[in-house]
Amino acid sequence: MSAYLKSSTTTHKALYALPAFVLAFPTIPVFVLLPSFYGETVGLGLATVGSVLLILRIFDVISDPLLGWASDRIPSSWGKRKLPMALGGLLGGPALIALFTPPDAAGVFYLFGWGFALYLAWTAIQIPYQSWAAELEPDYHQRTRLNGFREGAGLLGILAVGGLGVLMSHYSETVRLSYISWITVIIGVFTFVLALWFVPQGRRSFKQESFSFPWRNKIFLRVISAWFLNGLANGLPAVCLPLYLTYILDANDEVKAGLLFFYFLFAVFGIPFWLILAKTYSKHLVWCFSMLFACAVFCVVPFIGTDIYAFGVVCALTGLALGSDLALPPAIQADCADWDRYRFGKERLATLFSYWSMATKLALGLAVGFAFPVLDFFDLSSGAPTSKTALIVIYAGLPIVLKISAVALMWHFPLTREKHHAVQYALEKKR
């Protein structure tokens, strides 16, 4: 094991996590506010904006394996993970500002061009960033802890931008988005420089790069399948939550904001809780425990009716489970990459994480593509009892089935803590 990896400190982990804090800033504005902003405020129309964003999302999914493969081919001496992150930051900063401060003459090509640049920059940053964690920490437990630092920082970033939105609520939407974009870029420069300059590069690559999909890596296929199912299980309640708050709870905007804040706050609290459990049990079992815990919470949703306080408890407990979904699966995926390197002799860490990213995006896209047409079929806007029942089933029922399926895949996962230690030992002997 390298000298750095033996002496990895909390300071290194905190510096590595800093970019995640600022990367979370534009997440909700881009995915939630940008469509309506360009459709209504800029005046392009919702149908036109929806079509443009769909095309961009297709390009985004296609670019994942290409950029992952490119990152794996960059020589370690050039900064295998740091270089694409730096280039992504240089492209993403101007793209974010341009999208959030459009000129009066902004049209379809303006949205497509800068949107394409932002999506490309995001992928160029995110895939090497996640791969970097696997190279910084080969240890089974320390790798989980490092991922916990990163995801916790991301959740704090979401909470911070929510706080900024409240502080700037008296400004127009145009001004708020402009301020958020500039604040993101200014803080981003600071956090990226600290991480890229002071955090070591990690393990150097000496193996052959490969662009091939790991069909023979059954362990990877098992994890990514469980990740996709759990991602779909998380995506369905996420896209249906605003509708649930409106049509079931009849909540006002302040209550909605409060429940969302509560959800993400408890996700932050949940990360150290699940990390503590992962020190005692194999991380795949802890992930299974958290999914079963979320299933138990979803079971009570049909019985709470319009009780907002009871639903607040549901938000807190499901937020707690979210902490595990964020911190543990990426660490398990990194362990699978070690097995892939040992078993097949290929260096395709970022490529594997690019397929992981594709699965995430496809799960979220399928959640929207399934939930909204079904709810439209039942005419949710009418408020009929059957439409509300459909909403409850999609919000709380289907996630239980999907999460139990994911648990079935992961419960007897073969790459345990002891077996991973053996893989790491064998890899070190080969170096």
Image (cartoon, rainbow, N blue to C red):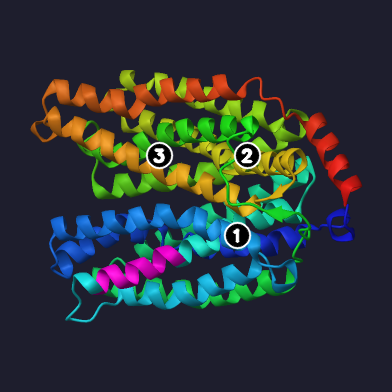
Is-magenta flag for residue 342? no
Of callouts 3 and 2, which one flags the residue occurring earlier in the amino acid sequence? Answer: 2
Q: Which residues are magenta?
A: 110-120
- The one of 258 and 225 positioned closer to us in this rendering: 225
Q: Amino acid at mark 3?
A: Ala
Q: Is residue 337 left or right of residue 310?
A: right
Mark 2 sits on what residue?
A: 328
Q: Main secondary structure of the magenta part?
A: helix
Q: Quadrant of residue 408?
A: top right
- What secondary structure is marked by label 2? helix
- At x 75%, y 38%, the residue is 343
Q: Residues within 10 Å of mark 1 (few under 14, many from 20)?
A: many
How far from the left and from the top, in percent, is residue 107? Answer: 18, 73
Q: Amino acid at mark 2?
A: Leu
How far from the left and from the top, in percent, is residue 409? Answer: 57, 23
Of callouts 1 and 3, which one flags the residue occurring earlier in the amino acid sequence? Answer: 1
Mark 3 sits on what residue?
A: 363
The Cα–Cα distance between marks 1 and 3, rounded to whole angstroms, is 21 Å
Q: In the image, which disc is placed on residue 128?
A: 1
Q: Is residue 311 visible?
A: yes
- What secondary structure is marked by label 3? helix
